[in-house]
């Protein structure tokens, strides 16, 4: 299984006997169809040859579905990017797989496949296995005219020095069904933001796979007429603060079925899709069937479907699963790309990368790659594939190591090595050389000390700050999520608390946020009160990605085009609100609470009748009447058959009693946000200082109780099992959060 260095997206080819031309980007580059391949007529001189648009701001989408959205400049809609994963179920009869594209496996097929792949009684002593599907399942093969089989693209207008090779890679885009929406489409810089409809898969998610090429691209999902970003994927903002997802395909796995092994129609399926999808391999000129697919780092098992039969490749490693079934296996390492973060006051800097040249004496020419804004103020980001020479040398070193034990094989490799690359193996070739311009008409440049180019020796992450280039390994690690209470935890009164708030902000902006971290405030404040805090603690308080309010009944996501202190800068998560509607009856809850207030005059009073927060009614109850009032309230709710949760918080003579939707609450909201952003529970730390924070500290995720915690919370910590999940810090406030993150190895 050969790792192939690749980048981002472009149209996949479609068979056509004639030629059809469409303008796909603002740079006037055009593509046409010829002999089953997409060809590019012209490549901009100051951009990657594979890119189809100039500045990322040209294609950026606002989160608002308003008339401000830019209209497409082309007059004829380009033919759709080929859908490698079809929304149709695949044809089910044996040997009658879809002739084009990729099919979903319906439930009957999947059950048979899992029986075949995981059957304890089946041992694959050979590399062949047969699968037979039910005769009565309809043939849902894809129409040739809409989804032709051509899969490789070829560039024109670019010299060999500009583009070493053209390799298409399958990349998977997903909008989870749990995120809401019934009509979903995808648009991005790879097709000038032309919408590509996505149908719902059998799993309930909206999934689309496109063939992509080297480069970095931005994209967004249109969900029920609203342009939204996936929270599971990297997000960047342009110079107009429009937030988009970003993808850089820098490494792929190549699935290959050789001609001499036989077969005319070849698919592959595996654990990367839980054996629910099968992807079509395309026939190359030498007769081999090939598919290049983008996968996350990890180990996968897979198997080929050749003319309806399940078979293993004899050239690739095999592994028996826990059911004793033999499958091929592949381990995908971290991709060979460079992610560079740049601290600057320039509004739209560009990363200038020298193009390869066969003439060492010629002046270098550069390709310009626009840099994207990050969530951290003053930091820009660019991610590009590593240089081709670096990859070739790395592959050569790996091959030498792999063949060292086989002298004959090593001799054969030496004899077939290209003479043009002989000097490549003896040179240290950096993964990236670059300089930075301010992007203006009369540019200023940021050069390495001594006036040369900055050099990133290896693939990975780097920071460039005040002329110093340093490794940033956290950019390749797993992101963290910090869910913190505000008052008494993240902020407080006095110089010591303010100093801690500032220290956390610096850490978050310069490290955690750049590494993809997610900051959430889980507060008893309303969204308006939280916004006021950004004014009160200006330049001290880090700006979060999400704010949870009203005992977990409202979730707001940050809209970067507005300042943090503006309520317009916080968009309510309507999917969460819709989820809370299930089984909730606000009027009935009001009646139950009203009976409680009337039964305990001067001891129970209203705080919120559900007018401010429609999924919460809030009371204040004197502590001496608390037990009796709670019993009456819960009895009333039970008699009315209302699904609700009663939450008690606060200290002192009066307690807060919140009656909320049964599936609401601080912990439930935390889990929802964590899943939305794709953060594992062990990478999510909840932080608090008082008893009402127990509501989010009692989950399975790590917890941090700061040193200035109130006695009731300290008592709770004392009674928890000593598993190391909960950390009680010595330092107070935000400094305690930093101490806790370090103790939990999340810093």
Image (spheres, rainbow, N blue to C red):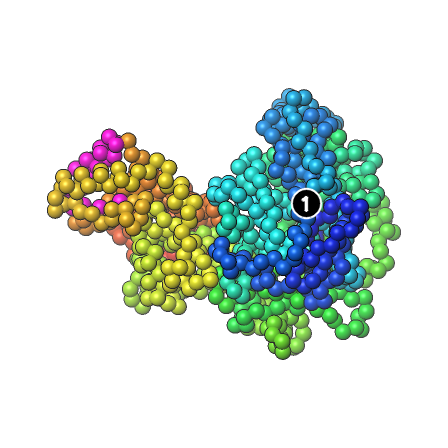
- 404 in the magenta segment: no
Packing grade of label 1 (10 A; few <14, some 14-19, many >=20) is: many
User: Left or right of 86: which side holds 707?
Assistant: left
- In the picture, residue 470 is in which quadrant? bottom right
Residue 172 in the image: above or below residue 371: above
User: Left or right of 340: which side holds 542?
Assistant: left
- Residue drawn at point x = 66 percent, y = 77 percent: 451
- Residue drawn at point x = 37 percent, y = 37 percent: 582
Q: Position of residue 111 (x, y in %)?
A: 60, 26
| Front-most of residues 40 and 74 | 74
Q: Position of residue 519 (x, y in %)?
A: 43, 55
- Residue drawn at point x = 33 percent, y = 40 percent: 661
Total marks in image: 1
Magenta-colored span: 617-640
Element marked by disc 1:
loop
Residue 369 in the image: above or below residue 205: below
| Front-most of residues 694 and 203 | 203
Which quadrant would the N terminus be assigned to in this image? top right
| Front-most of residues 326 and 58 | 58
Query: Would you say the magenta stretch is mainly helix, strand or loop?
Result: helix
Please name the residue that numbered disc 1 is placed on. Answer: 82
Q: Position of residue 328 (x, y in %)?
A: 69, 36
- Residue drawn at point x = 64 percent, y = 24 percent: 137
Residue extending farthest to the front is 75
Q: Is any atom of residue 339 visible in this view?
A: no
């Amino acid at each position: 299984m050969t790792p192939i260095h690749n980048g981002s997206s472009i149209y996949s080819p479609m068979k056509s006997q004639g030629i059809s031309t469409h303008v796909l980007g603002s740079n006037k580059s055009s593509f046409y169809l010829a002999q089953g391949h997409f060809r590019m007529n012209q490549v901009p001189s100051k951009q990657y040859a594979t890119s189809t648009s100039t500045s990322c701001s040209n294609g950026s989408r606002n989160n608002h579905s308003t008339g401000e959205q830019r209209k497409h400049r082309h007059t004829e809609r380009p033919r759709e990017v080929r859908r490698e994963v079809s929304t149709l179920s695949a044809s089910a009869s044996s040997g009658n797989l879809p002739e084009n594209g990729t099919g979903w496996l319906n439930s009957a097929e999947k059950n048979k496949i899992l029986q075949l792949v995981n059957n304890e009684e089946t041992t694959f002593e050979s590399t062949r296995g047969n699968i037979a599907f039910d005769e009565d399942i309809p043939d849902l093969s894809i129409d040739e005219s809409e989804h032709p089989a051509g899969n490789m693209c070829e560039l024109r207008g670019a010299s060999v020095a500009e583009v070493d090779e053209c390799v298409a890679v399958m990349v998977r885009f997903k909008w989870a069904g749990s995120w809401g929406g019934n009509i979903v489409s995808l648009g991005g810089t790879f097709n000038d933001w032309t919408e590509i409809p996505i149908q719902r898969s059998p799993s309930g998610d909206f999934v689309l796979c496109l063939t992509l090429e080297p480069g970095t691209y931005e994209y967004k999902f249109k969900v029920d007429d609203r342009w939204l970003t996936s929270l599971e994927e990297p997000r960047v903002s342009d110079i107009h603060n429009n937030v988009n997802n970003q993808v850089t395909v820098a490494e792929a796995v190549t699935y290959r079925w050789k001609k001499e092994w036989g077969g005319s129609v070849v698919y592959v399926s595996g654990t990367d899709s839980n054996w629910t999808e099968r992807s079509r391999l395309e026939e190359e000129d030498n007769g081999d069937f090939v598919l290049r697919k983008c996968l996350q780092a990890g180990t996968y098992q897979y198997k080929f479907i050749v003319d309806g039969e399940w078979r293993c490749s004899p050239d690739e490693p095999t592994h028996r699963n826990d059911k004793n079934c033999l499958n091929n296996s592949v381990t995908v390492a971290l991709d060979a790309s460079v992610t560079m973060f740049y601290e600057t006051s320039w509004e739209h800097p560009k990363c200038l990368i020298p193009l390869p040249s066969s003439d060492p004496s010629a002046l270098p020419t550069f390709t310009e790659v626009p840099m994207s804004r990050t969530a951290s103020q003053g930091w820009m980001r660019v991610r590009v594939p590593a240089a081709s020479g670096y990859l070739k040398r790395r592959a050569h070193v790996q091959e030498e190591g792999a063949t060292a034990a086989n002298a004959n094989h090593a001799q054969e490799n030496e004899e077939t090595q290209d003479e043009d690359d002989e000097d490549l193996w003896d040179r240290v070739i950096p993964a990236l050389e670059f300089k930075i311009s301010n992007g203006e008409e009369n540019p200023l440049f940021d050069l390495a000390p001594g006036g040369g180019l900055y050099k990133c020796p290896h693939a990975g992450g780097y920071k460039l700050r005040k002329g110093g280039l340093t490794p940033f390994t956290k950019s390749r690690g797993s992101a963290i999520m910090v869910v913190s209470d505000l008052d008494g935890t993240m902020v407080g009164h006095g110089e010591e608390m303010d100093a801690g708030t500032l220290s956390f902000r610096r850490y978050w902006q310069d490290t955690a946020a750049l590494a993809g971290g997610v900051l959430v405030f889980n507060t008893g404040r309303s969204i308006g009160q939280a916004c006021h805090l950004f004014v009160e603690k200006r330049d001290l308080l880090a700006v979060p990605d999400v704010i949870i309010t009203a005992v977990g009944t409202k979730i707001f996501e940050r809209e970067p085009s507005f300042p943090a202190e503006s309520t317009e800068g916080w968009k309510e998560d309507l999917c969460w609100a819709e989820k809370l509607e299930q089984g909730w009856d606000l009027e009935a809850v009001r009646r139950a609470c009203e009976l409680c207030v009337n039964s305990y005059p001067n001891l129970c009073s209203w705080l919120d009748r559900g007018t401010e927060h429609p999924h919460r009614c809030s009371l204040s109850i004197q502590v001496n009447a608390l037990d009796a009032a709670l019993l009456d309230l819960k009895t009333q709710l039970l008699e009315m058959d209302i699904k609700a949760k009663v939450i008690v918080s606060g200290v002192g003579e009066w307690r807060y009693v919140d009656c909320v939707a049964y599936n609401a609450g601080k912990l439930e909201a935390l889990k929802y946000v964590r899943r939305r952003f794709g953060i594992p529970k062990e990478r999510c730390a909840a932080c608090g200082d008082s008893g009402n924070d127990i509501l989010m500290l009692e989950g399975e995720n790590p917890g941090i109780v700061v040193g200035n915690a109130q006695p009731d919370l300290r008592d709770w910590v004392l009674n928890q099992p000593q598993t190391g999940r909960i950390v009680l810090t010595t330092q107070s406030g935000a400094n305690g959060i930093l101490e806790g993150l370090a103790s939990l190895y999340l810093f």
